[in-house]
Amino acid sequence: MAKKSVEQKPSDTAFFAALRRAIANKDYKNAILGPDDLAEYFLPPQFRFFLKFKFIRANARRRLDTYFPGLTEYMIARTAYFDRLFVDALKSETPQIVLLGAGYDTRAYRFTKSNQRTRIFELDVPTTQGRKIECLRKARLDIPDQVRFVPINFNQESLAQTLEKAGYRNDLKTLFIWEGVSYYLEKEAVDATLEFIGRVAHPGSAVAFDYTISISEENKDRYFGVEEFAQTMKAYHANEELLFSIHEGDVETYLQQRGVRMVDHLDNEEIESTFLYTENGSPIGKITGHFRFVMAAPC
């Protein structure tokens, strides 16, 4: 039987990202390592019940780590990185934030009190977005007036036309957050998104996203957890295979060729040293080694 795509069913990877954020929130209970206190609402009731127990969380994390070494740590760091950008944009009263592939992102709801006038566009495939709205309503979480849900298939539909119909304005400064998405897209879709931002977005805008570097048989052993990651994705998430990557060291050139300039970049070691330490300075672990963070702005 053919596996259903994310256009036919809600995203599995978005679900497991929420699961990892929920576990981190229970385990660390702080604003740096486990800030997402709403992630659990995207889990079935039995999951939320069992995650109350520390030994069950520990067992779940061990099982997750067996298949995806370092991915829970990566999700913790990724959440902290994009949280910081999101909050900074709200504090500076950036007029628009666009979440490209929002999944079960909770920032519009966790940081409502900090949002004075920023309009937030949440873009995602209808299946995942529909389940998200349903979960928000079941949890009785208010959807702020500033939020606009915008269904889209990134591989097939025009980002420019979709945003325009939703009320996005090119003449306003915008933060584009592209979290956990680029590597699932065709190269043409990634190119088109960056070219749109470089060509059309307000000059003061920025796009922040994560990506994976290209892994081959020759270099896979250099990066923690990537071989297990690839094997698990192939075996259990074939409907969400990784399609896009950038060769190590080529990201700045790649961005420039698409009309945006690199503003900031973090490799795997920099991600770990910046985000994965407890309050007493102890490291909590390594991330899956092929992930990177980058921020860019229109040239």
Image (tube, helix red, strand yellow):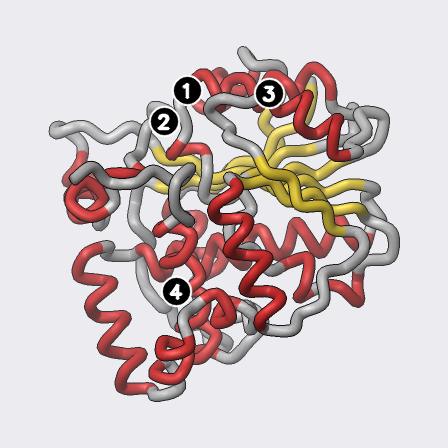
Q: Is residue 50 above or below residue 7?
A: below
Distance CA(mark 1)–CA(mark 3):
14 Å
Q: Is residue 153 above or below residue 284?
A: above
Q: Residue at x 39, y 33 (%)?
A: 183
Q: Amino acid at mark 1?
A: Lys
Residue 223 appears in view: no
Distance CA(mark 1)–CA(mark 4):
28 Å
**Where is residue 195 shown, x and y percent of the image?**
60, 16
Q: Which mark is residue 244?
A: 2
* Sequence-wise first label, 3 or 2: 3
Residue density around tag 4, few if under 14, some if 14–19, many if 20 or more, within 10 Å? many
Q: Amino acid at mark 4?
A: Arg
Q: Residue 62 appears in which quarter of the rendering?
A: bottom left
**Where is residue 294 shown, x and y percent of the image?**
52, 36
Q: Residue at x 30, y 40 (%)?
A: 4
Q: Nearer the viewer, mark 3 or mark 4?
A: 3
Q: Which mark is residue 158?
A: 3
Nearer-the-camera pick, 33 or 15: 15
* Sequence-wise first label, 1 or 2: 1
**Mark 1 lies on residue:** 187
Q: Amino acid at mark 2?
A: Phe
* Sequence-wise first label, 2 or 4: 4
Asked if disc 2 and disc 4 are in contact, CB closer than 8 Å, the reply is no
